Amino acid sequence: MNRLDIRKIRKAMGLTQTELAERLGVHYKTIQNWEKGGVIPESKMVLLRTLKIIKTEITSDGAEAGNPELAGEKELGYLNPPYATYLLPFSARPNEINRFYFEKAGHERVASPVKGADFATILSDDGLGPEFPDGALVFFRHIDPSLFIEWGKVHAVSTRNGLIIKRLSPGREPGRLLCSCADPQFEPFEITVDDPDMDFYKAVACTAIK
């Protein structure tokens, strides 16, 4: 986004300054200041980018959430997502990924193009391929790995040391999963499915900002 044309984003979404301020958690006078060229904090830049979704890859979960027009990858232009979820850092650990902790810790909320996303995080490299580029905002939904894992798709695994975000495939032995990515500098590795300190989440949407 070239210096984030706040007024253009707001007008395209059909929002007043007050309505946009409510979505971003700021006073409407702050929006007025930004539209006049005021400095936008980085945390609010992230939120604003989620409101101007340029290219989105959404799985079939998008259609299940009542958004059949969002299934697949296509140019979307401006989108007005009706949902919201929490923005988490890669360092988030299992006990930190729950609604009680989100509210207690005061994590920022971001607009989500799909319903039911448990959290979102920002990628910091291109290791997952062109569909998930550096800086993309990825949304995840909790799954039970003992019931179903969509092989080859991007998942987040919450561990004691933070989040693992990789493509999952069957491991060499039952009960094990292979974690891999497109970047050859990162060697694939295996994890166990039944580790009590792990929780599994499937990527249900990825927004890549041009």
Image (spheres, rainbow, N blue to C red):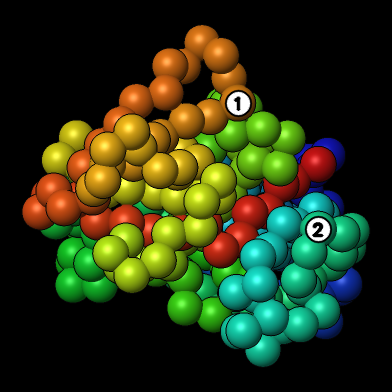
Residue farthest top in this picture:
185
Q: Residue at horizontal 69%, vertical 81%?
A: 63
Q: Quadrant of the C terminus?
A: top right
- Alpha-carbon neighbours of circle 2 within 10 Å: few (<14), some, or many (≥20)? few
Q: Amino acid at mark 2?
A: Glu
Corner quadrant of residue 28: bottom right
Mark whose residue sits in front, 1 or 2? 1
Q: Residue at horizontal 58%, vertical 57%?
A: 47
Residue farthest left in this picture:
196
Please provide percent x and percent y for residue 170: 40, 43
In this rendering, does residue 4 appear at all?
Answer: yes
Closer-to-camera residue (2/76): 76
Q: Is residue 134 left or right of residue 13?
A: left
Label 2 sits on a secondary structure element that is strand
Corner quadrant of residue 21: bottom right
Q: Is residue 155 left or right of residue 207?
A: left
Residue farthest bottom in this picture:
66
In this rendering, does residue 164 appear at all?
Answer: no
Which mark is on residue 73? 2
Q: Residue at horizontal 78%, vertical 64%?
A: 72
Please provide percent x and percent y for residue 188: 42, 23
Closer-to-camera residue (38/98): 98
Q: Amino acid at mark 1?
A: Ala
Please provide percent x and percent y for residue 160: 15, 40
Q: CA distance from mark 1 to mark 2?
A: 19 Å
Q: Quadrant of the N terminus?
A: top right
- Alpha-carbon neighbours of circle 1 within 10 Å: few (<14), some, or many (≥20)? some
Q: Which residue is mark 1?
A: 182
Judge whether 144 appears above or below 63 on screen.
Answer: above
